[in-house]
Amino acid sequence: LVGGLVVGVLALALVLGGLGAGLAISSQGGPKATVTTTETVGNSTAPYKVTILIATDSIFNATAQDQPAYFVVGPDGLLSSSSIKIPVNRTIELTIINYDDGNASLNFPNDNVVSGTVGNRIFVASNDNINSTQGASQIVVRGGETVSSLDPSQIAHTFTVPSLKNALNVPVPVSSTVVAFFKVTKAGTYAWFCMTDCGDAAMSTPGWMRGNLVAS
Ligand SMILES: [Cu+2]
């Protein structure tokens, strides 16, 4: 019985020793596992991402005071939205982050309806005022929703390009993040507007609530 136990212990030691040797060999440059990647960086068919945000506390001048404005989120910080550059003939993934918690009336009654995007829909990734409720001890988030229109009373601003073939119109709820996919098939400079009554100075000045979308 004692001999059997010794043999068993020896066998275990050999197994452990073998395991250790195997690990040592592989950590010193043994054959490497083949890794298959699905890297798509640089693939021109991948959506081109543009993020713009709406802030509310920029002072226009002493008379107009603070006005809402769109900014482009660039690699080093905010850029003016007066000229938003995009590639032509490539799907654009447009993300709009809206810090404005106030709604505004629409200049035209149908501007609550999405148009010019894939499926004429937008994805409302977050809608802080509407899409979540406060639980007893935690916030309960319902999650995003895909919509083809919004209740006009929810809308703070829009990102609208009437001169595009399918008249891009992205209504943006108060305190929300919206994602829209669209494509411009003809190079050119297209004026964009916000179609809510959100501030006379902002609505009439490039880089605030209007500007150009430049596709090339
Ligand atoms: Cu606006």
Image (cartoon, rainbow, N blue to C red):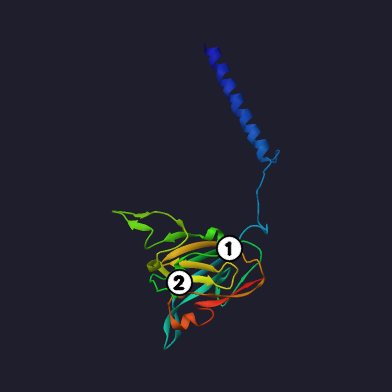
* Residue at the extreme front of the image, as rendered: 109
Is the CB of mark 2 within 8 Å of ligand 1? Answer: yes
**Residue 183: % across, % down:** 61, 64
Q: Residues within 10 Å of mark 1 (few under 14, many from 20)?
A: many
Amino acid type assigned to the residue bearing label 1 in the image: Phe
**Residue 146: % across, % down:** 47, 56
Q: Quadrant of residue 80?
A: bottom right
Q: Secondary structure at mark 2?
A: strand
- Left or right: residue 152 compared with residue 84: left
Amino acid type assigned to the residue bearing label 2 in the image: His
**Residue 205: % across, % down:** 51, 82
- Residue under the point 55% across and 69% down: 167
- Residue under the point 60% across and 68% down: 165
- Alpha carbon separation for disc pair 1 and 2: 18 Å
| Cβ atoms at labels 1 and 2 below 8 Å apart | no
Q: Earlier in the sequence, mark 1 or mark 2?
A: 2
Look at mark 2 in the image and give the residue it sits on.
Answer: 157
- Residue under the point 61% across and 61% down: 91
* Frontmost residue, 210 versus 99: 210
Q: Residues within 10 Å of mark 2 (few under 14, many from 20)?
A: many
Q: Secondary structure at mark 1?
A: strand
* Residue at the extreme top of the image, as rendered: 1
- Residue under the point 62% across and 28% down: 17
